Image (cartoon, rainbow, N blue to C red):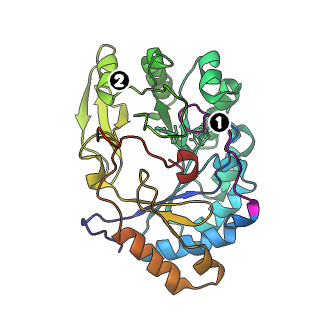
Amino acid sequence: MLIDQFGRKVTYLRVSVTERCNFRCRYCMAEKPFSWVPKENLLSYEELFAFIKIAIDSGITKIRLTGGEPTTRENLDELIAMIHTYSPQTDIGLTTNGFLLPAIAAKLQQAGLKRINVSLDSLDPDIARYIAQKEILEQVLRGIDAALNVGLKVKINSVILKNINEHEIVQLFEFARSHGAQIRYIEYMENSFAHNGIKGLTSQEILDVLKNHIDFAPIPKEEGGPANLYETHDGYRFGTIEPHRHDFCSTCDRLRLTAEGDLIGCLYFEGSKSIKEAIRHENILKAKEILEEVILNKPEKNLWGSEEFSISNRAFYETGG
Ligand code: SAM
Ligand code: SF4
């Protein structure tokens, strides 16, 4: 079992399979990075899997593949199949912008994927294009349909931004509800890779808008889950993710691995430790030692709630969000 120095049990590993992305969301990768990590510096699927096996054997029960855009890395289904074959009970999820799902949703499901989170910030093609800096909406919506059609459980992630998509809170809610998908409104996390001037709505502001639309009440959080959950009178559940809250990190159960093999204890901080050499030398003991060290040094909390240091210099497209 993996437990950090604050007594938090770490059971969830987010694995970024690439930092590259086919979108340029203004709140994440507003501009193409100066250079991409050369492909040979990335861990191969076999290398990622070698570490994932160690993590599962140490107590990780949930794995989420993310990026950048994870579906832009070829044959993602192969990595899913490796994990699923090794440990069928491990809960494997994927976070994606949905653009490539029409072509690959069935393959991913057949490989063992059960759950998928699709980022959808607008139902207006012009606003979706403005945020992602690309014509995306029609294909993303087809991607969501493709995922539902092959039986994947879908959640929708929405980041609500002032003066951009804040008038769509209710429409996004109703879209998700009508598709049987839980929507989670993620508060914008300030970072130095976002477009200047981007401002997010707080969860309270989002909930205030929803209150004028529908009745709902808070329900307990899922164990280790980041979202505060709410339920409407007819049983529809939705959530808010509030990294600015003082107690957000107290139940954090997660660890992140970048595509280059850096193991990260907290989304906010730049500290990391590489497992690449250990994995490339098939030194399982060393990789496990690094895993335990990163967990031991997992920071107590992020600084998004703090006045002085609220902007992170960590790119979301590297850490996978
Ligand atoms: N490309 C995939 C996607 O967009 O879903 C996976 C990677 S993305 C970094 C993972 C999640 O992080 C997405 O739901 C995205 O909306 C969220 N995200 C990215 N930048 C963010 C920011 N500055 N604040 C809050 N959420 C952010
Ligand atoms: Fe790409 Fe996802 Fe970041 Fe948008 S949020 S730029 S889709 S990695």
Q: Judge by depth and name the residue closer to the eye, 46 or 236.
A: 46
Which stretch did the figure color magenta?
24-39
Residue 257 included in the magenta stretch of the image: no
To which quarter of the image does residue 16 belong? bottom right
Residue at (66, 63) in percent of width and height: 79
| Residue type, mark 2 in image | Ile
Calculate the distance from the C-alpha at mark 2 to the C-alpha at mark 1: 28 Å
Kindly identify which residue carries mark 2. Answer: 206
Task: Give the mark, 2 or 1, whose residue is nearer the N terminus.
Answer: 1
Q: Quadrant of the N terminus?
A: bottom left
Residue 126, percent from left and from top: 64, 16
What secondary structure is found at the residue carrying circle 2?
helix
Residue at (50, 49) in percent of width and height: 314
Kindly identify which residue carries mark 1. Answer: 31
What secondary structure is found at the residue carrying circle 1?
loop
Q: Is residue 122 left or right of residue 255?
A: right
Q: Where 216 sits versus 103, above or below? A: above
Q: Is residue 209 left or right of residue 256?
A: left
Residue at (43, 34) in percent of width and height: 188
Q: Judge by depth and name the residue closer to the eye, 2 or 91.
A: 2
| Residue type, mark 1 in image | Glu
